[in-house]
Amino acid sequence: MKLYILLFSGAIGFSACGAGSAASEIPPQADIPVKLLALQSQSTAASIPVSGVFTTDDEVLLSFKTGGIIQRILVKEGDAIRQGQTVAILNPVEIDAQVQQAQLAFEKATRDHQRATNLYNDSVATLEQLQNAQTAKDIAQQQLKTAQFNRSHSVITAPRNGFVLRKLAAEGQLVQPGTPILQTNGAQSGNWLLRTSISNKEWAAIRLQDTASVEVESVPGKTFTGLVSRRSEGIDPATGSFAIDIRLTGERPANIAFGMFGKAVIHTAVQSKSTTGNTWSVPYDAVLDGDGNSGYVFITNDGKKAQKVKVTIAGMEKDHVIISQGLENARQLIISGSAYLTDSSTIRIIQ
């Protein structure tokens, strides 16, 4: 029995000694190597990246003044057109009949007015009857003018030299008054526009005449200048967003066409809102867990421990993120090694 007790006690002592030895071999938590960037606030406006398609400011939707059946469409998409050229014709049977009815009504009103005048001169008709006949004649004359005007607009002619961009209807189709039939633009005479959709927040930051840097896919490696020329005052029901037009102001791209995709960066004239009135430009890699207009970064004020802080993102540039809030009390930003950090991690600064 004593032998068993001694052996058991020896096993416990050996185990305890082994545990102490293993614990003494665990190294302390290693400092995480990081690179730092000294933070400096700046009074800078946010840059807003957008994308859209190109169009022109002389784009026109052509339609008939009256409804009816399309008899002929004389052009195809991509065709060049001349000012005054007939491009579409409405079936004239109905509108011609309306003009004829108005003509007959005017002729009858003219005869009635002449009879009333003769009777009035013979003291048979009253002045009221003569005046009523004159009014009926005037009404019939205006109705005739209206019918003639409608007939003149049952034929679509090109408003200027240009090209047919889209054909929106077909021959034999019944259309209502004002239904778009063709979409045209000028023959390179108008200004090129990049039409884009933007969010509510972007719309609030963008103003007319804000400058923009525009890229055209057909001209790689080259940037063109532009200005915000239109800013919608309501949401487009088709897209559920606001729309703006960026007009190219400098050199005209040689290879550009209607509907071509383009990108731009708008340099807003209004500074981003922040608690200090300033912003910070930080590298993309420094921002973690980005979600909409917020994210997280690691900073350090003592060079020994990392601190995770939430920041507000005001915009993005080509290779930087614009921060408007969250860095007011920060001295240095951790730009390398952030993926291995947690709040209060010890750090080691490397060059």
Image: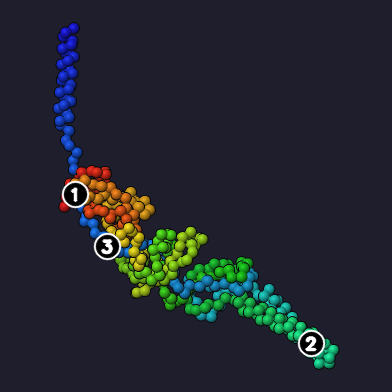
Mark 3 lies on residue: 42
Which residue sits at x=38%, y=53%?
292
Residue 122 visible, this angle: yes
10 Å neighbourhood of mark 3: few (<14), some, or many (≥20)? few
Q: Earlier in the sequence, mark 2 or mark 1?
A: 2
- Residue found at the far right of this picture: 124
Question: Up-down: is 330 above or below 150?
Answer: above
Which quadrant of the figure has residue 245?
A: bottom left
SS at circle 2: helix
Mark 1 lies on residue: 303
Which residue sits at x=29%, y=49%?
309
Q: Are marks 3 and 1 in contact (CB under 8 Å)?
A: no
| Residues at marks 2 and 3, CA–CA distance in whole angstroms | 85 Å
| Residues at marks 3 and 1, CA–CA distance in whole angstroms | 23 Å
> Amino acid type of disc 1?
Gly
Which quadrant of the figure has residue 19?
A: top left
Which residue sits at x=63%, y=73%?
66
Q: Position of residue 142 (x, y in %)?
A: 68, 81
Mark 2 lies on residue: 127
Front one among 152 and 315: 315
Q: Are marks 2 and 3 in contact (CB under 8 Å)?
A: no
Which quadrant of the figure has residue 133?
A: bottom right
| Residues at marks 2 and 1, CA–CA distance in whole angstroms | 105 Å
SS at circle 1: loop
10 Å neighbourhood of mark 2: few (<14), some, or many (≥20)? some
